[in-house]
Image: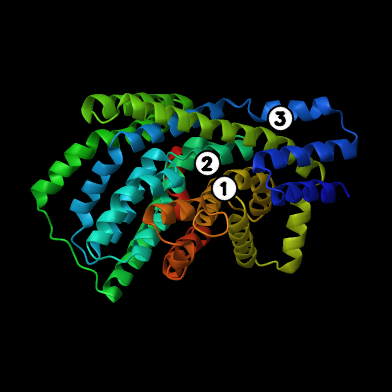
Amino acid sequence: MGLLILFGLFFFALIAGVPVAFALGIASVGGFVYEGIPMFVAFQRIVSGVSSFSLLAIPFFIFAGELMMQGGIAMRLVRLSAAAVGSVRGGLGVVAVFASMLFGGISGSAVADTSALGAILMPVMKEKGYDSDYAVNVVITSSIAGVVVPPSHNMILYAVAAGGISVSKLFIGGIIPGIVMSLCLAVAAYVIAVKRGYPAEAFPGWKALGMSFIVALPGLATAVIIVGGVLSGVMTVTESGAFGAIWAVIVTTLVYRELTLEKFRLAVVSAVKTTALVMVLVACANAFGYLLALYRVAEVLASTVTSISSNPAMILLMLNLILLALGMIMDMAPLILICTPIFLPVVEKLGMDPTQFGVILMMNLGLGLCTPPVGGCLFVGCAVGKIRIEEALKTIWPFYLAIFVALMLVTYIPAISLFLPSFMN
């Protein structure tokens, strides 16, 4: 009955239009009241949810991403990608994929990736003869690299929800899977471009490629500072995020000189709003997770799944399908906080490393950002591309398939996500 009340209040609040963070809080309060647990315990759980030092890195990563989006770094990464891969058939589609991987590795946000690169690439693609649905689909699906390639504030949320596992291992564990996913999407973009007869751009020459790399290097150095500082042990995750934000200010004001006072204000306001949302979500989800543990949801789910099949491969496939379905109806951050304490014990019993599961979780829920009815990247991409969501969904399935192939590779080949972290032991 307690579990029924917990999930009943949660879904009722969602249907009523209550924000997810507050829906989690309402459901948690209902659960505590039903169990007769004093309210000060609920308050303690909420406060302890945001009392993690690792969470301090999140506002820095968000702020750095906003600064880069406002300060011209995205444009230079697009030019670098265009010089490198724009000469293949349907080159602008492949450019979108690799530009997303580069920008996602700096901003750590799929929605920021879609917004920034979509505003740059979609008008150019349409001008060159690309269909609107193709332009939108390739940009929104490639933006998932922003939650897989480090640094990703969603990985920090997972690390906290998983009980404080190594953020450094998660960061480096996402590099190869992010590249694999980008390659799968690039193949899909190329095949569709050939089928539709899209043009190829002329190769600008090695000199132009070198110049594009030099111009983009200060922006790329942001990712080196953030990720390199953590992996080298010189800085903590929080310190690297702070230095990354400082470097972003320096690059966008002194090097590129595009960060005006008004753009800086917009970056600050957007970062504050996003950070506040994430922190409230983490706080309420911690109380919700306390009740999930009290009701032994993870153990019940594990026994239910294993009763259906004892084959580890089949169990992993079922878990992936469940996560994909959940990603279609809820946003990414709350799902990370809700699903991690439920599914992580299940996969650990199968012998899966928490780092590998973290990458799998990011890819599953990242795909949810591109699917209706709550796909944030899908909505933003269609708004930027000025097409209806229904029009984009008619032809997006090859990109969904490409991401699913990458997801299956990461699920069943542990070395893809664990090879690089193995050198940190």
Question: Which residue is tagged 3?
Answer: 46
Q: Residue at x 84, y 47 (%)?
A: 5
Q: Position of residue 187 (x, y in %)?
A: 33, 66
Q: Check disc 3 and report its element: helix, strand or loop.
A: helix
Q: Residue at x 36, y 32 (%)?
A: 67
Q: Say which amino acid is labelled 3.
A: Ile
Q: Is residue 225 left or right of residue 203?
A: right
Q: Is residue 161 left or right of residue 413?
A: right
Marks 1/2: CA–CA distance: 8 Å
Q: In this picture, is 347 found above or below 107?
A: below
Instruction: Residue under label 2, please give it.
Output: 154
Q: Earlier in the sequence, mark 3 or mark 1?
A: 3
Q: Label 2 near label 1: C-beta < 8 Å? A: yes
What residue is drawn where x is 77% and y is 49%? 7
Q: Which mark is residue 332?
A: 1
Q: Is residue 233 above or below residue 114?
A: above
Task: Classify mark 3: residues with Cα within 10 Å, few (<14), some (14-19) or many (20+).
Answer: many
- Which residue is situated farthest in the bottom direction here? 195
Name which residue type carries label 2. Asn
Q: Is residue 146 left or right of residue 339?
A: left
